[in-house]
Amino acid sequence: MTTTKKAGVLGATGSVGQKFILLLAEHPDFELYKLGASSRSAGRSYAKAVKWRQTATIPQSATELVVVECKASEFVDCDVVFSGLDSDVAGDIEKEFKESGLVVISNAKNYRRAPDVPLVVPLINSSHLDVVARRVKQEKKQGFIICNSNCSTAGLVVPLGALIAKFGDISDVTVTTLQAISGAGFSPGVLGFDILDNVIPYISGEEEKLEWETKKILGSIAEDDSFALRSNMTVSAQCNRVAVSDGHLECVSIKFATPNKPSVEEVKQALRDYVCESQKLGCPSAPKQCIYVLEEDDRPQPRLDRNRDNGYAISVGRVREDPVFDFKFIVLSHNTVIGAAGSGILIAETLFKKGLL
Amino acid sequence: MTTTKKAGVLGATGSVGQKFILLLAEHPDFELYKLGASSRSAGRSYAKAVKWRQTATIPQSATELVVVECKASEFVDCDVVFSGLDSDVAGDIEKEFKESGLVVISNAKNYRRAPDVPLVVPLINSSHLDVVARRVKQEKKQGFIICNSNCSTAGLVVPLGALIAKFGDISDVTVTTLQAISGAGFSPGVLGFDILDNVIPYISGEEEKLEWETKKILGSIAEDDSFALRSNMTVSAQCNRVAVSDGHLECVSIKFATPNKPSVEEVKQALRDYVCESQKLGCPSAPKQCIYVLEEDDRPQPRLDRNRDNGYAISVGRVREDPVFDFKFIVLSHNTVIGAAGSGILIAETLFKKGLL
Amino acid sequence: MTTTKKAGVLGATGSVGQKFILLLAEHPDFELYKLGASSRSAGRSYAKAVKWRQTATIPQSATELVVVECKASEFVDCDVVFSGLDSDVAGDIEKEFKESGLVVISNAKNYRRAPDVPLVVPLINSSHLDVVARRVKQEKKQGFIICNSNCSTAGLVVPLGALIAKFGDISDVTVTTLQAISGAGFSPGVLGFDILDNVIPYISGEEEKLEWETKKILGSIAEDDSFALRSNMTVSAQCNRVAVSDGHLECVSIKFATPNKPSVEEVKQALRDYVCESQKLGCPSAPKQCIYVLEEDDRPQPRLDRNRDNGYAISVGRVREDPVFDFKFIVLSHNTVIGAAGSGILIAETLFKKGLL
Amino acid sequence: MTTTKKAGVLGATGSVGQKFILLLAEHPDFELYKLGASSRSAGRSYAKAVKWRQTATIPQSATELVVVECKASEFVDCDVVFSGLDSDVAGDIEKEFKESGLVVISNAKNYRRAPDVPLVVPLINSSHLDVVARRVKQEKKQGFIICNSNCSTAGLVVPLGALIAKFGDISDVTVTTLQAISGAGFSPGVLGFDILDNVIPYISGEEEKLEWETKKILGSIAEDDSFALRSNMTVSAQCNRVAVSDGHLECVSIKFATPNKPSVEEVKQALRDYVCESQKLGCPSAPKQCIYVLEEDDRPQPRLDRNRDNGYAISVGRVREDPVFDFKFIVLSHNTVIGAAGSGILIAETLFKKGLL
């Protein structure tokens, strides 16, 4: 008796799709079952269709799968479908999948702002999945979409959420990001000539996403099961692209709303002590430690720390007082794991543990 | 009749020293006259003593100069001495030079905090040189030290100063830097293995310098001709090293003290309109435009914009409102020109134009 | 009375086109007159149509020019047209221009192998332009195409040609290249994610070009004015892309056909002594020194030496005996100047000096 | 009953030492027992003494070990000592260890040319260890030194040796390397400012090592158990440093001595079929496949292929005919695993399997 669930991947040849495939290849809960890509790739074996750019070799379980078009009829047997589609096509395709009763976990931005779609970073707001649970309870086999967040948002919200849980409201957040080029995908991605010996101080739409998504993720569920933004917190973001392959670094300053400020040591302890639901549920990809608090002056660093707990953990360093705000610190997260495909996987594992798949 | 002044360079084989030599090589006001370095290099021709790392070839006027030790007796004929010494030796040597009646313009950090030493970014506070003028007037041929600022400070203070001049006090500044590796010099400098595919989110002492020096440079001259810090402005800095050869990028947020805030357009116009004293004096190295305000979303960029006006101009981009503060923008400055050796040159040109050399 | 010639640029928004525009902007012989690009760009000012990626700012003389489509009728007033077109469109367009009586100097590969088209690296085989001279003499105002070489070829043929001229036939050449990413252009160019912390040991078609073009450039003019390949020389190439913005480095081993081998010192002297025709003619862009022979162990280096004589000179270093062949050495050339647009400019200057424009 | 052997590491805080520690941390045969470093580090815990630069975190088994000085008396209980010492101190220290009866496996160059010291790349000439076996048989508990090769040598000799074994003598080899910066170690290592946007076409002593060591490794054992160089093969090397963290790429051309040349397909098959002794012995670190022959045009690439079989395998690609020689191909090897520390580990595993430890 097999208990694994059948998984499909949309946009399987792209940057996020390749990562989904790597993470699903030897997964205990999921079986790589269907791979969807553009009509140009459809009909070819995955090994032939893909320009593979990962440091691990293509998983055996993927090479011989024949790529299909991204139509719900092709994925009807899937228990869960992971979408790494580009936003220019994700809107229509994911909608069709949902309406066909499929469960779509999407990395695309298209439905993140929909009031009835959970926007989930599983290390911090898996409670938002309760909305789905209630809906599923009402009507079996209904399709739905769950979005994971933008890559730079995923790193920020985890320490913010952990600190709010411990010390109460944060009124102001200023964040400057130094983001890896893998976040831009491969098509067109970031040109080598543009990033070598350079910084690109702009990522289209990124600052808006980071400022807005943070408020939805750290927001609450309204009585009608829609998602309410966290209204008493203001976020200001400046986003940069740097010559790093993987790993987003973020320089953060925060101000608590309460007059009783914790000490630096209390802030660090709260981050260290934080445990997320996927850890408690025993999800196979859950990090051993949700937030690593590093004490060395010059850590975390993208190259050295991005792979902690296989990229599912967040690293925080240089926690110190801020002369303008209350505290400043840096956050590092693996943008293609917990910042993208890995978040999707961990959402699916959580759904599975809760009996929602 | 020659009117050029004799220039010496201390630490001539190092990173800053090499840049001084490049900038002085065909200078209309200064003649490369004496080169000082460690006893290991003394006695050798400059071409033999130096491990030259600049993209321009070694200037003819430097190659055959014989390197001497950094003793005042060797530099007694110099009208001005530029110091690119490391801080571990700069303290004693610069003191000896000053006490021997020499004019020292230093890139080292040792005397920046001395209450009687001007700390000057010539694009913004050349007025601080008036203190020197008054002292020279009192006693001919007296030695003195003038310091240029830390490299990351130079970029920040220019737009801040221009905005204060136009709109009044700024109460809060938050700045995150993305700094080039040339700023670390060559010995030991930043290891390639440490910076490739990486960010180092820490530069020893840098944040303290940036937060403190900004207040001295934008401060005032007290009645006793000592320098008073700007007390009503708080600065919070986070400093990072990125894989860029030259050019420091800084993401800045500011809050004005006044309730009457200018508009984004007024801020940009004030930056564009700003003219510094070295421009008015006709200093040969003064930038054509002190602050370039770029309108493209993704500019300034280090590789594309660092060399504007030969590295003597500051570039500002992405001026926009800040949901937490009033405004945010990015600043780019060439860290080894206006952020180091070039500032020294421009200070010397200003002194020369004012008859103080 | 103006004596400047009207210049057109095809593919003006691309990588090579941008370089043509920079090199023509303040040219004493040529006036930037027409800019051609795809229909998507046509009708817009150049400043609006282009995504400018050069370290120098867009020349004033180009910004306000209105981009036109690449049709001969638009360029009929041009004395010379420089083509930076991609090879997928260059074939038809350049043919139409030639048939309309226009002089086309092309960086595209399409006509390099045509037996009646000169393939010219102006530092070494400008004598091949004599064929054009004879044709022009026969029939006034006839159109023709001249090709500059592939970028990696340009660096190799100059020292080879200089040594053949001095010491006679070379029978065998082995060359391994380390090529800059600017050589791949911008569309799609080399992805940052692919080249960061990496080498790509393959450039499509490059080895064949390097092996074949070298023989045409160093070949002779047959009696019927067609070009004959140098048949007694074999070239073997291995081509790699490395994380360098500009500047191709090539590791070369050569074997002379003659039993009387020169010494290392004689080889170096022959390279130093070599003077090309564009130098003799006084072409404004001709290098001061055609081949710089560097004596330091670790030179030439792309970042430090690519801009010698504005990128029009070749640097050779590490000339030494080879235990398998006779000699080995390294060659550095600026791939977008003498390896592309600059070669075109120098060809045009040579034609102009010879009265062929 | 434990059967693990006690392992010491000399130079434990350096680049190679850190790698030894990583590879030994959870090794089935060896137990991390003693760590030696300079007197500056001695007496401190390893975690405090080291500036750790690896992407994996410091192994638990190393953190609390107290670093000792590199004296034989400290290591007298060790069954095997791995030396990652710098060559300026390795000579004396390794000699003292050997004379104290210790088994030293060294990454330093000092004894590689000693006629009685085996120079071993365990994937290709572990048979050279037989000399040690015979000596040990004669006299129990005698000390000896075994050297692993220079990093660039390790990649080259494996395919060469495999082809010689199958097809007979190779007369000529030309190799151009593109070497990673980790090969230079950390002190001083390669400066970021020197390698960013650059190639350094020189590595001191490297070409001589590559040309000479290849002949010793592929040479034979003389009757007196000294090592005889392979005299009928000539190697010419050109060595470059590129902006890659780990992984040496080598462009190789070879000429067989025999008139009966194999085909390209036969060459590839011989490489694929090659099996080394450490595989047959079941050494725990032996690669699954000794030589991977890649068929894609653009592979192997350092970032994508360096970690095949944990860095113990060699990758070969682009096998094709060479117009000057017989064949050309590229070789990729992980310079700090099979090119350094990993070779030492595999030598020790082989000794262990043969009962020589």
Image (tube, coloured by chain):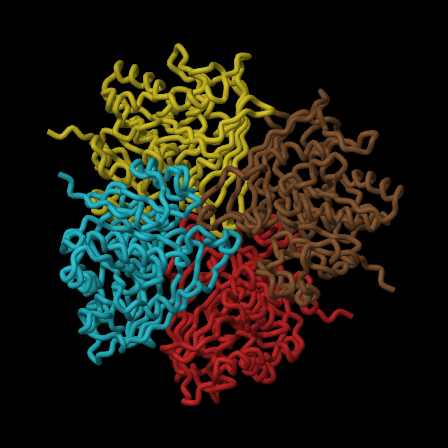
Chain colours: A cyan, B red, C brown, D yellow
Identify the residue at horizontal 19%, vertical 48% (top origin): A284
Relative to D118, is C109 on the left or the right?
A: right
Of residues C246 and C16, the one nearer the viewer is C16
Identify the residue at horizontal 76%, vertical 60% (top origin): C31
Please identify the quadrant where the N terminus of chain C is shown. bottom right
**Vertical comparison of B246 with D76: above or below:** below
Identify the residue at horizontal 60%, vertical 71% (top origin): B346
Q: Is residue A256 visible?
A: yes
Percent across and percent down for residue C323 are 58, 24
Hey, which quadrant is residue D182 in on the image? top left
Please, which residue is most extreme toward the top here? D223
Hey, which quadrant is residue C318 in on the image? top right
Q: Is residue B61 visible?
A: no
Identify the residue at horizontal 30%, vertical 31% (top origin): D345
Of residues D43 and C253, the one nearer the viewer is C253
**Vertical comparison of B135 with C153: above or below:** below
Percent across and percent down for residue A264 are 24, 69
Relative to C323, is D341 on the left or the right?
A: left
Percent across and percent down for residue D191 are 47, 49
Hey, which quadrant is residue A126 in on the image? bottom left
Please, which residue is most extreme toward the left here? D1
Of residues A163 and C142, the one nearer the viewer is C142
Relative to A343, is A199 on the left or the right?
A: right
Of residues B98 and D323, the one nearer the viewer is D323
**Vertical comparison of A328 with B254: above or below:** above
Relative to D279, is B124 on the left or the right?
A: right
